[in-house]
Structures are given as structure tokens and as C-alpha cells.
Amino acid sequence: MTSTVAGIPAIATVPPIVSHRLARRHTRHIKERIIEFFLFLAAASSVFTTFAIVYILVSESWVFFQQVPLRDFLFDTQWTPLFSDAHYGIMVLLSGTLVSSSVALLVAIPLGTIIAIYLSEFAPFTVREVAKPFLELLGGVPTIIYGYFALLFVTPLLQKIFPELPGFNLLSAGMVMGIMIIPYVSSISEDAMRAVPMNLREGSYAMGATRFQTALRVVTPAALSGIAAAYILGISRAVGETMILAVAAGMQPNLTWNPMEPAATVTAYIVQVALGDLPHGSIGYQTIFAAGLALMLITLFFNILGHLLRKYYRQAY
Amino acid sequence: MVATPIVEVTSAANPQQSKVLKAEVVDLNFHYGSVQALKGINMPLYEKHVTALIGPSGCGKSTLLRCFNRMHDLYPGNRYEGRIKLHPDDTNLLDPKVDPIEVRMRISMVFQKPNPFPKSIYENVAYGLRVRGVSKRSVLDDKVEEALSGAALWGEVKDRLRDLAFNLSGGQQQRLCIARALATDPEILLFDEPTSALDPIATASIEELIGDLKNKITILIVTHNMQQAARVSDFTAYMYIGELVEFDATDTIFIKPKNKQTEDYITGRFG
């Protein structure tokens, strides 16, 4: 490049920078791979945790079922794992869970749905903007506070109506649990309703429908998949709720379908045993894994149901 | 461009004869909040004729259409001035004392995009009757069949009335929406660009349907497609930036408009 023709000075050439740029690209590539790896790790950790929980539950339950036949577990009507005459009928605990969850859902589903319809279809903008954060605050209150609220406020109140109501009972715990679940139901339902396109509402109004008819006959069915998902989430919350029941519903295993009685739920029992001084590895201790597995299967069932409902009602509007 | 419609318009038995007023827009102003969208509109609507509203985007044609069934009442901050008189009883549709629901019971609407409800085909058509409190099965069955036949859809759906309306094609959905609007025997049927979301074949079938319907019902249609206005309407109103520039029989508007601006728009010089 230095030799020139007829004295014309050589054009100064920039040294090739290709390798340099390649090198930078190379480090960038490695950096991206590292970032990618950490992102993958973050995502994998949740999956790994789930599998770990399932593994522990299943393997520990396996030990339990070596000693207690599945038939007894499912059909025995007594739950007395700590007595010398031990019985392991999970039905006893499930009845408590079922009754308290039913009471909670009887409160949360109608109220949550009505609130969602009101906020989405009727409330003026300002009301909605003020009400929603307050409602969501309801879901952020620690459940132990709800538990004492049920025990010390709602139960005495209910005792004025039903004087024979015991101090620990499923009714008051269930009702307060219902109040706790309201924001889960209402918030997701409202989002689903608000996502219904305006032209569907206009179509309904144009037919001479009132606001109420439009909300009930057009918007609600159009938002059904979202509303179903909200209900399922509410059910899962109710079944898995622990503190309110441990505090306000009593801890005695009691096979009952009457909400006016005290009874232990699956979750309350697990708390009781986990906090007690049972030796690890004893059959009494193993029961909490079997109970936990039962609980997880129930919530899994509802999650799958919710998934199927969503798919079934998914509509392309 | 106007060659085919001339034949069709003349076949409409000279609209100027036998024209009876169905509704009358008198000095109508309309405001979206502080924006005035319609300025001093005066326009007749003749019974059992098709009136088309044409004009460039944003001229207020849809806004005018939606005054007829008080759709603007759904949103806050909208304001009407003036009157739309509905004959024969001379009701002012825009009177605040007149319940918009009463207005919508008499005047049906078909929207730009087909908007069937998340219900069966049958329940979609029965909707207007149900919100009016009709629940007798035999009445509903008859009305649903009548409306679906009127919308030229009965033959295609009579064996699957229980299917979800979403399973129909776009053109069928729009005819379903027309059936839904017809089922309540409205006095006026409003169409807001009913074919803009449809393919040419579905468009042709809707246009044909509008031609059939005008024997029974008064029709007001907004369209951005001038050929469509020429094909389906008896009268045409040309609007520009919130004002009604010219209203006349469709053949007059398309062959010898009085206003230069109308002529420019019709001949495609702007818009």
C-alpha cells in the first residue's frame, strides 16, 4: 500500500477492524448466554420447587400408606392419629374443609360477582377508581388478623343470633374467609367483564335492553371464562386457607356437615401437628404428609377444572 | 361508476312519488363534550325507502345515525340540540323526557362489525323480545323464524338454531344481527357501514337484503362506499365536516348534483 504511482501519496487505510468487532460480538454473545442461563435458572427454580414438593409429599405419604391401608384413610370415620387406638379417616378433616369452604364461597361468590358487575357496568369512573384499591386491600390483610376478627368479633356477633353457637365454629371462620376471598373473585371477574368489547354492549342497548339486562344477559355470559377462573381461584384459596380456621374454627377433628360446630380442617390439622412435639418419622408425624397430599390433589382437581372451563367457554368475540 | 345504479334507481319506481315522511331531523346540533360534531342538520327520512348517508371520514354521518337511537346517551358528556321528529306520533326522539330505551324499542340498529351475543343463534334473534318480557315459546319460535327468513338466513341455520352464533361466518353473523334487529318489528332500521367488515360476496347478499327490506321498513344507512349508496338507496345525503351539504334523490345526487362539493366527492376528486 505504500508504493504509489507518479508520486501520489498513498491513501491512508484504516486497519481492518473485523476481528475486533467479532471479538466484541463474541463477548456479547457469552454475556447473553450467561443472562439467558440465569433467566432459565429463575424459571426452572419454580418448576423444580413444585416437583420437589410433590416428591416429598408422595414419598413421605408412601411411608404412611405402608402402615395405614388406603381404604381406612378414605373411609374411616375417625381421625385420632395421636391416640393409642389410632384411626386415620381423612374424611373427618375433609368435612371441616368442605363445610368451611362452602360457607366461604356462599359469601364470596355472590358478593364478589355482584361487586364485579357493579364496578364494571354501573359504577361511575370515580367510584371505581376509589373502590378498587380498597377492595384489593382486603386481600392484603394478613390472615391471622382475619382469624382473630372471626374469633373475637364475628363469633360473639353471631352468638347474639344463635345463642348456642360455640366459641369455635366453622360458620364464623367460613364467613370471614369468604370476606377475605371477595377481592380475588371480584377483581378477576371485573377484569373479565371489562374486557368484553363495547360493541357487544352497544348491540344489547340498541335492542332496547336496560343496563341491568345488558350486564346480566350479554356481558356476564361473554365474560364467563374469566368469571369461572375467578371462582376456581376462590375455591382454591378457600380450601388452602389455614390461619383463619386454625384460630377461629377449633382444632378438634370432628366429622360434621354442620357449620355451627367446631371442627379441624386439613390445613388446621397440619399446623397443629407441625407445631407440636411429635417425633419426626413417627406415624403421627407422617399423617401430615398424607393430609397435605390429599389437599394438593383437591386443589389440583379444581385447577384442572378451571383450565377446562376456560377452554370450554373461550369465545372469540 | 354510475352506469349500473341508474337502472336500479329507476326500477325503484321513482321515489319522489308516494313518499311519506317517517322522520324529520330539525336543526340538529350535536356535541361530543366541547366538540361540535353536527351543525344544523335538517333532513327528511321517507317511509319504506332507503336513505344513505355518505361523506368523507369524520364528516359526522355515523354520529347522525347514532342520534336516531340515542346511542350517544351511553357515554357521558354528549349533548343534543334540536329535534328528530318521528312520525306519525310526532315524538321528538331527542327529548330528554323520552326514555332512550323507548326509542330503541322502535328503532333498531345493525353495526359495522357483526356483534352477535355469546348465545345460541335462536337466543340472539329472540333477545329483543326477551328484554321486552316476551317468554312464550310459541310466540318466540314464530318471531325467530320470521326474522331469520326476513334476513335470508333461515334456510342456512334452521337445523342448528341451538349452535353458538360465533360459529357462523362473518356474512352470516351480520345477517343474524339484521334478523335480531328485525325480530322486534322496528319502525326504522339503522345500518352503520354494515358491510365494511365483509367480503364482496357477503356484501352483495347484505345489499340484496336491504333491497328486499325496504318494502317493509324505513332504512337509514351509513356507507363510505359510494357505489353501495348508489346501488341500495333511494335518497342520499352528502355530509361534510358536520354539515349536511346536499340531500336529494339518489339518482339526482349521482347524476347531476347541485352542489359543486358533492360533485367533487362523488366523482372521486377528493375524500
Image (cartoon, rainbow, N blue to C red):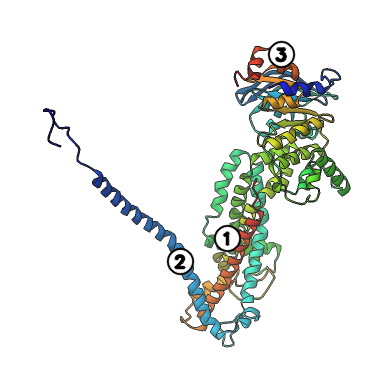
Structural distance between the alpha carbons of marks 3 and 2? 79 Å
- Vertical placement of residue A108 versus B40, above or below: below
Q: Secondary structure at mark 2?
A: helix
Left or right, A304 with reference to B9: left
Image quadrant where one finds the C terminus of chain B: top right
Q: Chain of mark 2?
A: A
Indicate the chain on which mark 3 is placed. Answer: B
Which is closer to the viewer, label 3 or label 2? Answer: 3
Q: Position of residue A121 (x, y in %)?
A: 66, 43
| Badge 2 amino acid | Thr
Q: Quadrant of residue A109?
A: bottom right
Comparing labels 1 and 3, the label whose residue is closer to the camera: 3
Task: Please give the label number shown on residue A149.
Answer: 1
Q: Could you say which is closer to the camera, residue A131 or residue A310?
A: A310
Q: Which residue is under mark 3?
A: B256
Residue corresponding to mark 2:
A49
